[in-house]
Image (spheres, grey):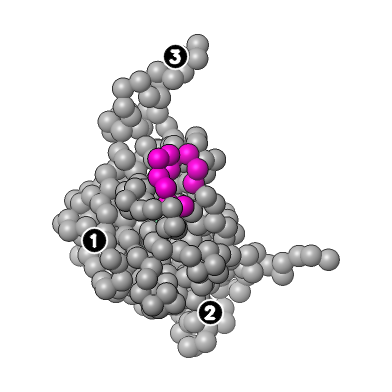
Amino acid sequence: MQFHDSMISLVGNTPLVRLGSVTEGIRATVLAKVEYFNPGGSVKDRIALRMIEAAERSGELKPGGTIVEPTSGNTGVGLALVAQRKGYRCIFVCPDKVSTDKINVLRAYGAEVVVCPTAVDPEHPDSYYNVSDRLVRETPNAWKPDQYSNPNNPLSHYESTGPELWKQTDGRITHFVAGVGTGGTISGTGRYLKEVSDGRVQVVGADPEGSVYSGGSGRPYLVEGVGEDFWPEAYDRGVADEIVAVSDKDSFQMTRRLAREEGLLVGGSCGMAVVAALKVAERLGPDDVVVVLLPDSGRGYMSKIFSDEWMSSHGFLDEGEGEARVADVL
Ligand code: PMP
């Protein structure tokens, strides 16, 4: 019989897929590491598993304990998936701007979700930050993974994503491109690839225009999961050789092209990372192998990036795109 003992053993070992359409005119090979093949649908399953298992080993997470984390998205799904298997309770704290669909996904996996008002100061007792801190203090056997400062976040990529890429490309990878949120993916994967290649692999961060990593002050942008207005501990400032800033419009237009032309229904940070990867690949030759990591699936963004109304209301559709295409067909 061929089966997996649980969904947990399916974390990692995601495939590489060559991009063949959006790369027109580019001589380098551009490969996408498609992280939606993880059981929870995103790259964050990797860090969830490693953070939980490390906390079990150190005794910070005790049998029957409760995991409390301020997260609304992919990290919550990963934590909930691993926690239910191992018998932990999960409480996630989300701001009220998070869509009910995202909250319902977390609840579907068995997590409890506490929703906090966005329109209060960080010092207010009901703020997102204060509520999660209070829950940690007041819940017996509570443990907060804190993906922004937990060293097991980058370590999970040093031990899984990095070695997978080296093996899958037979050591031929020359450039690694990833969006930067907590910084865990780029720091862990980038460090491994630098070490194993004696510094040959170039590491490129993709960042929304306005975020700190590309020199901004935290100005708002709409791409989710990437960019910050502070410098997290999980980010190794020495790892990236280059940071490429990408606009929301370019990110979302590329996200839609990936679905339509490459069969890759992925999230907005994936489009952003691909824009940066193509910018790098344009100046490279046929022996170069660029790998770009695509963190999650597009299913969570149907009413935003994949809605013509939402895209045009933000000025992200060019003349003749979207509804005009429907008119052409009629
Ligand atoms: N894209 C998405 C959709 C994410 O949820 C995240 C994680 N915040 C990232 C990219 C960035 O990954 P990292 O936190 O490892 O920098």
Q: Main secondary structure of the magenta part?
A: loop
Front disc: 3 or 2: 3
Q: Where is residue 6 in the image (x, y as percent from the top left)?
A: 68, 67
- Toward the front, the furthest residue is 286
Q: Where is residue 58 in the image (x, y as percent from the top left)?
A: 48, 88
In this rendering, position of residue 34 left or right of residue 155: right
Tag on residue 35? none
Mark 3 or mark 2: whose residue is earlier in sequence: 2
In this rendering, position of residue 7 left or right of residue 159: right
Q: How crowded is mark 3: few (under 14 residues within 10 Å), some or many (20 or more)?
A: few
Specify whether residue 16 is in view: yes
In what element is the residue under mark 1? helix
In what element is the residue under mark 2? helix
Indicate the quadrant where residue 312 lies.
top left
Q: Where is residue 67 in the image (x, y as percent from the top left)?
A: 47, 72
Specify whether residue 106 is in view: no
Q: Residue drawn 50% across and 36% down?
A: 261
Ligand 1 closer than 8 Å to the CB at disc 3? no
Tag on residue 327? 3
Q: In this view, does 194 lie above or below 221?
A: below
Mark 1 or mark 3: whose residue is earlier in sequence: 1
The amino acid marked with disc number 2 is: Glu
Q: Residue drawn 31% across and 71% down?
A: 239
Query: Does the magenta segment cover residue 27?
Result: yes
Give the labeled residue for mark 1: 213
User: Which quadrant, please, contains the N terminus?
Assistant: bottom right
Q: In this view, does 226 lie above or below 329?
A: below
Compute the Cα span from label 1 to label 3.
Answer: 41 Å
Indicate the quadrant where residue 202 lies.
bottom left
Q: What stretch is highlighted in magenta?
A: 19-29
Q: In this view, does 289 lie above or below 6?
A: above
